[in-house]
Image (cartoon, helix red, strand yellow):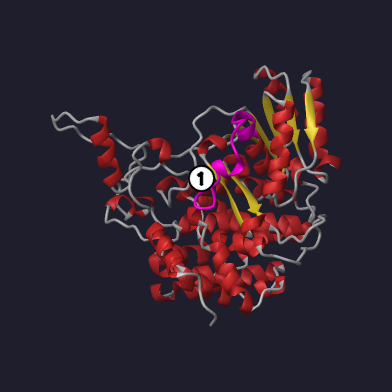
Amino acid sequence: MPSRPSAAAVSNLMRMVGSSCSCPAHSGHSGAALVGTAAHNHGHSHSHKRLASAAMERPEYAFEMATSTVRVGAGATQEVGMDLANLKAKRVMVFTDRNIAKLHPLKAVSESLERAGINFSVYKDVRVEPSDASFQHAIDAARAYAPDAIVAVGGGSTMDTAKAANLFAVYRDAQLLDFVNAPLGKGKPIDRTLLPLIAVPTTAGTGSECTGSAIFDLKDKKAKTGISDRALRPMLGIVDPLNTRSMPQQVRLASGLDVLCHAVESYTAIPYTRRGPAPANPLLRPAYQGSNPISDIWSSKALRMVAESLPRSVANADDCEAQDAMTLAAAYAGIGFGNGGVHLMHGCSYGISGLNASYCHPQYNTDHPLCPHGISVAITSPAVAEFTAATSPDRHLEVAAILGADITNAKRDDAGTILADALRRFLFDLGVPDGISAFGFTSADIDPLVESILPQHRVLKLSPRQTGAEQIAGILERSLKNY
């Protein structure tokens, strides 16, 4: 095997992911806290400085549940103009891509804004799978136009681009990397109120209408990264299934697989009590906190909906019931992973997408190589399941059963194999490419992929198992071929 990334890189990652605690709050007891309480004074006088110091040393004991307001209904897009009028918006910027610009969703939004007498401008240059350059182009446009509200009409790429434009329209002097997740960026917290952002998703996948994340390719590092902060969340997500009717089959597939992995990863992430120390200030508590009792509910429900509806949606463009269920599943999973987080499937996907040099997935109208996000995430899911199952075998068996596996006489020690096989069957039946070798990767590419994946601290630290270069390399090796 060729040499791996440096020991320093591995050591740094281990420090990020290796923390744990024996707190019972997420180990089957009923006392999990929904809202953190202040440290007890016990009659003593403590300075704010000492309280902050104590908080830094204390294991995490609380989690937060934050999401956008979500409006669901066929035809609900027609209300967006009234929403903006209610906000007294005078200068709205609408973000979309050149494909959606020709279709029903943008037409419905534009007509609604016109009926409400809203002045607006449409930005059509969103890049599918955004890059730092495309983010910057959108940011420059937003700063020049100076909107007082923003509407995103499109899939995750459009919603993420609109979030970035919103952020930097408010922080006019900031640089892109100021808020990008460490270590690739400075990871500064957002401490100003952003513009109202209404998200109108046109795919059933990313759940970006419910989350505070904006993901892009950082080209000079050959890695995907992003900005993650609750302040980025749209104030409103309009989940209108009529806006997903124009999705090609392969877009339905890729976006649906993203929902699948959001749900599985959130449900199997490290428990929030083991993520690390409690923050010194609640502002510093990450959006991705680890599995928790509320995220579990949303993720579990989303997973069941995906298992039932995604195969139907992919097989039949006229199965509106299945498509409608997938739009809801995407939002449900968005609420779940938007607070619980994702881990290794997404972490590996960022390297796979970032280093994709030639593969272009069918039915995606782009002028650059493109491995759709949902495809790149799902491709390592069997190998990841094998790796993480020992940490929570019952949860992994539960996921396998939802995907159709018979676990009647299953042994907990076999949970990884059982779930991996269930995932392989699910992906094979949907026609997903056979491993990362289908994108042109070989064993010789494992080292560069590992180096691209290692900096993804935001998600890797939520892996339920300690994860370094050797473990990631093993996952990628096992993912060269899936069938």
Q: Is residue 303 left or right of residue 357?
A: left
Q: Is residue 194 above or below residue 309?
A: above
Residue that lies at the very extreme toward the right in this rendered image: 102
- Magenta stretch in the rendered image: 166-187
Q: Is residue 58 above or below residue 271?
A: above
Main secondary structure of the magenta stretch: loop
Residue 248 in picture, x, y percent from top left: 80, 54
Q: Can residue 76 be seen in the rendering of this structure?
A: no
Q: Hey, which quadrant is residue 112 in on the image?
A: top right
Magenta stretch holds residue 31:
no
Q: Nearer the viewer, residue 207 or 141?
A: 141
Residue 38 in picture, x, y percent from top left: 27, 34
Q: Which residue is drawn at the image coordinates 57% and 73% (left, top)?
A: 447
Residue 373 in picture, x, y percent from top left: 66, 57
Quarter holding the C terminus is bottom right
Q: Can residue 173 be seen in the rendering of this structure?
A: yes
Q: Which residue is drawn at the image coordinates 83% and 34% (left, top)?
A: 107
- Residue identifier under label 1: 186
Q: Is residue 69 above or below residue 381?
A: above
Q: Hey, which quadrant is residue 173 in on the image?
A: top right
Q: Is residue 183 left or right of residue 74?
A: left
Q: Which residue is drawn at the image coordinates 48% and 59% (left, top)?
A: 460
Magenta stretch holds residue 179:
yes
Crowding at mark 1 (Cα within 10 Å: few <14, some 14-19, many 20+): few
Residue 44 in picture, x, y percent from top left: 14, 30
Q: Nearer the viewer, residue 302 or 43?
A: 43
Q: Which residue is drawn at the image coordinates 43% and 52% (left, top)?
A: 291
